[in-house]
Amino acid sequence: MPQFTIPEADANVAEVLRAYDFPATLLGAVRYGQGHINDTFCVLCQPQEGDCIRFILQGLSLAAFPHPEELMENFIGITSYLRKAVIENGGDPARETLSLVKTRDGKDFYTDSTGKVWRLTPFIENTDCFQSATPELFEASARTFGRLQYLLQDYPAETLHETIVNFHNTEDRYARFLAALEADKLGRAKDVQPEVQFVLDRKADCSVALQALRDGKLPLRVTHNDTKLNNILIDRTTHEGICVIDLDTTMPGLSMNDFGDSIRFGANHSKEDEQDLSKVNFDIQLYEVYTRGFLEGANGCLTQTELEYLPWGARLMTLECGIRFLTDYLDGDHYFRIHYPQQNLDRARTQFKLVKDMEEQFEEMGRVVKKYAK
Ligand code: ADP
Ligand code: GN1
Ligand code: MG
C-alpha cells in the first residue's frame, strides 16, 4: 500500500483531516493542481478492496478572500442551484457540479486553529483538467462556460456576497498599480520601465467596460470571473466539459469578462509564465472556436451589446491580469503564488504581449463574434 506523508509546512492539514470522517483508511494528502491562490490537496483513502477514493481538500487563501464564510455561503447557494438544474436536465449531479463533504460535527467547512477555512469535496473522477488544449477541447470548455452563463441567468444575484471587492474593476486595478509603483517597496520599478509604460499608455482602456456598465449598456449578471481552462473538468470519455470548478469568485459581473478570461488563458500556445516572448502569440483560430462554443452554450441569453463587447472582454481581462501580476511583482509577490523570484514579472510580460497581439487583430475579433452571434 503506498505511503503518503504530510509535509511539515502543511502541518495544519493533519489537523484538518482529523475533522473529517473518511469512508476508508486515510492514506494522506498531497499537494495538487496548478492554482495560484488556494492551497489544494488531493486526499487519498484506501478501501479494503478496489481503487483509492479521492477527495479535494482546499484551504482558502485569506490574502485573497478576507471573508471565507461568505464565500462558502455563495458556494453552497450556487452549487445547490446548479444541482437542481442538472437534475432537471437529466444529468448526474455528483459529476456535473461540486458538492461538499460535511465535517464530523456536521459543518460545511472547517476553520483551523489559525483561522484558515478549509473545504472538502469529492474528487470528480474520470475527468481531466488541462493547462492547454486542442481546439476541440477548448471549444468544449467554451460550451460549458457559456452554458454556465445560461444556467445562472435567473440566479438571484442580490443574494451573493462580493467575495473580492472590485475584483474585475479595471480602473481600481490601475489605481492600485499606480500606488504600488509609487511605493516601489523593493526598488524593482527601475527594472520594469517598458512594462510600466505599457500600462500607463492604456489608462483609458481600463474604463471601457466600466463606462459601458455605468451608461447602462451592459447588464450585471452572475458570472464566474475566473474562467481559465484549468477551472473546468473535462470528461475523459465524452471529451465534454462536465463540471465548472473554482467557484470562489462567482458573483455579479460582466459576461464579457467570463468570455475574455478564457481567451486570455487559452487562445495561445504558451505557458502563462513563458520567458521566450517569441513563443507567446494570440491565436485567432482558437479565439474563433472558443467564440463559437461560448455562444452555443450561452444559447442566445446575451444581449446585442454584450456580444459587441466580447472582444473588449478578451483585451481587458488580459490587460487587467497583466496589471495584477506586475502590481504583485512591484509589491513583493504577496498575492499570486510564485515558484521563482521573477515569475510574476514573466507572467505580466506574456499578458502584455497577448494584449498587443489582440490590439492588432481587434477588428477581426469583432467579425468573428458577428459570424457566430445568434
Ligand atoms: P485554485 O483556486 O487554487 O485555482 P481550484 O479550485 O481551481 O483552486 O483547484 C485546483 C485544481 O484542483 C484544479 O485545477 C483541478 O485540477 C483540481 N480540482 C479541484 N477540484 C476538483 C474536484 N472536485 N475533482 C477533481 N479535481 C479537482
Ligand atoms: C488566479 O485561482 P486561480 O489560479 O484559478 C486568480 C485569477 C487570475 C489567475 C491568473 C481569486 O486564478 O483572477 O486570473 O490566477 N484568482 C484569484 O492565472 O485572484
Ligand atoms: Mg483554479
Image (cartoon, rainbow, N blue to C red):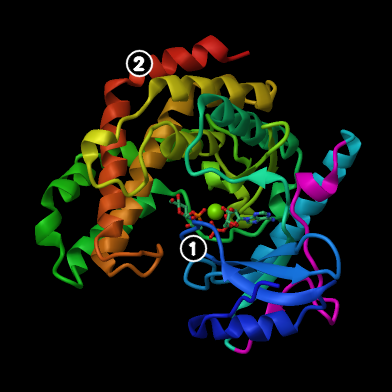
Camera-nearest residue between 78 and 54? 54
For marks 1 and 2, give the one nearer the viewer: 1
- 188 displayed left or right of 327: left
Kindly identify which numbered label has been placed on residue 314. Answer: none
Camera-nearest residue between 4 and 305? 4
Tell me if the residue at label 1 has its CB under 8 Å from ligand 2.
yes
Camera-nearest residue between 158 and 121? 121
Please rate how many residues cluster around mark 2, counting C-alpha atoms within 10 Å: few if below 14, some from 14 to 19, many from 20.
few
Q: Is residue 150 above or below residue 62?
A: above
> Among all residues in the image, which is located at the extreme front?
1
Which residue is at 18% across, 48% downward?
195
Q: Is residue 102 magenta?
A: yes
> Among all residues in the image, which is located at the extreme left?
190
Q: Secondary structure of the magenta portion, mostly?
A: loop
Q: Is residue 240 magenta?
A: no
Query: Can residue 266 be seen by looking at this rendering?
Result: yes
- 83 displayed left or right of 332: right
Report x, y in % for residue 318: 37, 40
Please rate how many residues cluster around mark 1, counting C-alpha atoms within 10 Å: few if below 14, some from 14 to 19, many from 20.
some
Camera-nearest residue between 67 and 44? 44
- Label 2 element class: helix
Q: Is residue 1 above or below residue 12?
A: above
Kindly identify which numbered label has been placed on residue 37. Answer: 1
Which residue is at 38% across, 25% downward?
283
Report x, y in % for residue 99: 78, 58
Mark 2, residue position? 363
> Among all residues in the image, which is located at the extreme top?
371
- 345 displayed left or right of 84: left
Going from the N terminus, do you reach mark 1 or mark 2 first? Answer: 1
Query: Magenta residues?
Result: 91-113
